[in-house]
Image: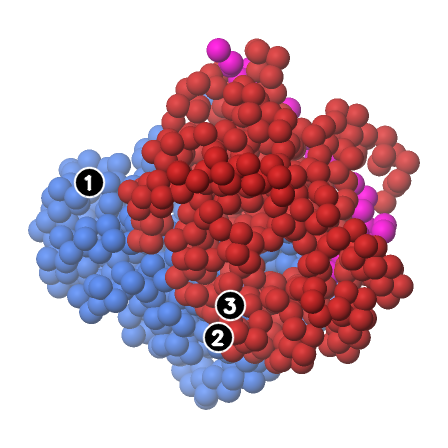
Chain colours: A blue, B red
Amino acid sequence: MVTITGYEVHDIRFPTSKQKDGSDAMNLDPDYSAAYVILQTDAGLEGHGLTFTCGRGNEVVCCAIEALAPKLVNKTLDELTADMFATSRVLTGDSQLRWIGPEKGAIHLATGAVNNAIWDLWAKAEKKPMWKLVADMSPEQLVECIDFRYITDVLTKEQAIDMLRKNEPAKKQRIEEMKDTGYPAYVTSIGWLGYSDEKVKQRCADAVAQGWTHFKQKVGGNLEQDIHRARLIREVVGYDAKLMMDANQVWDVPQAIEWMEKLLEFKPLWIEEPTSPDDILGHAAIRKALYPRTGVATGEMIQNRILFKQLFQAKAIDFCQVDACRVGGMSEVLAILLMAAKFGVPVCPHSGGVGLCEYTQHISFIDYIVVSASLENNLLEYADHLHEHFEDPCVVRKGRYMLPSAPGYSITMKRESIEAFEFPKGKMHQQNVH
Amino acid sequence: MVTITGYEVHDIRFPTSKQKDGSDAMNLDPDYSAAYVILQTDAGLEGHGLTFTCGRGNEVVCCAIEALAPKLVNKTLDELTADMFATSRVLTGDSQLRWIGPEKGAIHLATGAVNNAIWDLWAKAEKKPMWKLVADMSPEQLVECIDFRYITDVLTKEQAIDMLRKNEPAKKQRIEEMKDTGYPAYVTSIGWLGYSDEKVKQRCADAVAQGWTHFKQKVGGNLEQDIHRARLIREVVGYDAKLMMDANQVWDVPQAIEWMEKLLEFKPLWIEEPTSPDDILGHAAIRKALYPRTGVATGEMIQNRILFKQLFQAKAIDFCQVDACRVGGMSEVLAILLMAAKFGVPVCPHSGGVGLCEYTQHISFIDYIVVSASLENNLLEYADHLHEHFEDPCVVRKGRYMLPSAPGYSITMKRESIEAFEFPKGKMHQQNVH
């Protein structure tokens, strides 16, 4: 019997803006940060969860976690996991708190961290990696974890069970396959907008040498520079490799179409975040204008399952880049994976930042093993930053994520990192005043 | 010369849940609250702004205000108002803070309060009520206050100028008309879900006696009870009066259609918030099924201009219920009014709560005098709660809002109310521990 006895909230910030890691046309100077929650128990186990942010504002998400976490204190893990649907509703359905969402912005980012901490605790208690906790569920058990509110017009519980049941027979086979081959990835950290040409060239050459075949370029700052850099990357990686482009929301709809017309000669696989993440109809218009010359991708700022539902309904995207903690944690991610599979849209989770690769590897393994059973056009993002701060960091070899085996959601940060990077009092902020 | 020298942030909560004021199918027990900001200046003037919330979570919005307000300190009012577009971008465009939105949830609710405080200060400095500050602008001046990012596919600056120019000749005439007649309103506070039948009956009878002709009923808890209550209200107010229904997001799309089919016999003018505020395509489907037997209304939780744009594009709503502070303050409200006018959708702002009537009267007067120049199907919501806490409360006579004349945005709360209801340390919370 495991009872949650309390919680810790930590505002953790890494001063990444100094190296321009993560810089793009919209995010000029991110300090990769985590609004971090630890669920303490009486059983020597802890549940860890975080939400990734870009620095300023991390304290707002921490404040929102403080509003949610007390709801779990004195609950047993058994009562929380016996009805994960009800547990996720405890976090999203507070009749007063929902006013500041609902299910969006700071309160939903906080929900993501707290919901994931419950899943992490559950997986640790079961001594299973997160992906296996889900893979071992029956279709009926899995759908009981999901809140179908506002999505029953495209997916009912019964339809979800039918979909999952079809994948049951070959599940073990796909697990073995993943153990052998890992999950295909692409690398983002070659092309940050703030990097010099030389640095990009070197990083591309290194990545090719390491076996990477998919590369992402940041665009949208300046058209001539985008063309110059696309040419430079193609020179190093060739045209057998796949090149993705990412505009990080800088364009209006007509501008997105116009700008991309000029970049199509470099054969981008997709244009990511061409406009506001809130603009479903805008993405649909952009896709209509550019398809099939390139695809449309978005997701890292898509706030919840209701927006994803509409992106699918409107045929607005070719790639679903769900984030692990912007939406309400694993509970909501499962709903999104199911809808993506139903609409035949490949899931390529948003990753990078701090801790996102650790999270999303489980999402992609669950998607392949349990939900979509497809690897056609699926790719998981990878960026090689800040993994050293985690107890059980993701392992990537030759452009593929290896199947994790340690219990939990792989998101437990080392105690010394939590302490050193706690903002503003941690020692790394004392040394590096910024 | 007015310079902003500092700011105060107050977490103000009124324990309204005790009387079930404001209760509906989703908001069971709101404590009407305000995340409140005061911009202090060196000129004896203060800029006031608030965002309405339902209680818990108000502290998260206050935390977000603390992240935004420092950006204004040491700025002069002249430099802020000389380029209100740039000023609103200072609040919405911070390259790190936008991660926890962008332009949604707690950070955008905070933006609403801070942006409105700037407008309030500006109007006070000009010694004009808010509506007149805007009404006195030329079309060119007005559009320079607006951020057209992400809406140029439906409305450009040039198109907005053309629209406004057409309304110039009769502007003075409409001001005189409003001085004489006021702006038509409807009353919500007759039908809270938690009220008894007797209380609803009495409130309806009182409202009829006071001259009200439009009434709003909360629905969605229980179909039989909804039918019972609709019948009861119709018995008191008759069928010449207009009855609106409000489900506060409790339904999924198919359920909304099914449920409303059973309530159409009571001739509702609209069904408000039939489903998730994020579901543009869902609202469009519901409207398609029910129109013209009833209309669809939403807006109080519509997060920003980009969602409104799509509601208009998708022909999803018949009434635009923009909120004064959920979106990014008057700067963003102006963009939404212009789009609504372009698509011919009447603006019926969300009001009630605490301070919302004080805000929205200016919005409706601006809409009529400057933007839409229409009163066809326009109605401003009214609820008779908590007005006594404001220095310059709205004045409603015979079901119509009177044109305000005091300088500012009418949102300045009395100092003694701020102090008494400050959470948790104000004396009203000491007496009423909850």
What residue is rendered at 41% in x and 65% in y?
A: B314
- Could you tell me which secondary element the residue under label 3 belongs to? helix
What residue is rendered at 62% in x and 80% in y?
A: B261
Q: Position of residue A197 (x, y in %)?
A: 16, 38
Residue A12 in sight = no
Tell me the tag on residue B283.
Answer: 3
Q: Position of residue B263 (x, y in %)?
A: 68, 76
Q: CA distance from mark 2 to mark 1?
A: 43 Å
Tell me the tag on residue A405.
Answer: none
Chain letter of the residue carrying label 2: B
Mark 2 sits on what residue? B288
Image quarter in which the N terminus of chain A is found: bottom right
Mark nearest the camera among 1 and 3 is 3
Q: Name which residue type carries label 1.
A: Asn
Taking the magenta stretch, the answer to whether it contains residue A346 is no
Residue at mark 1 shares a chain with residue at mark 3? no
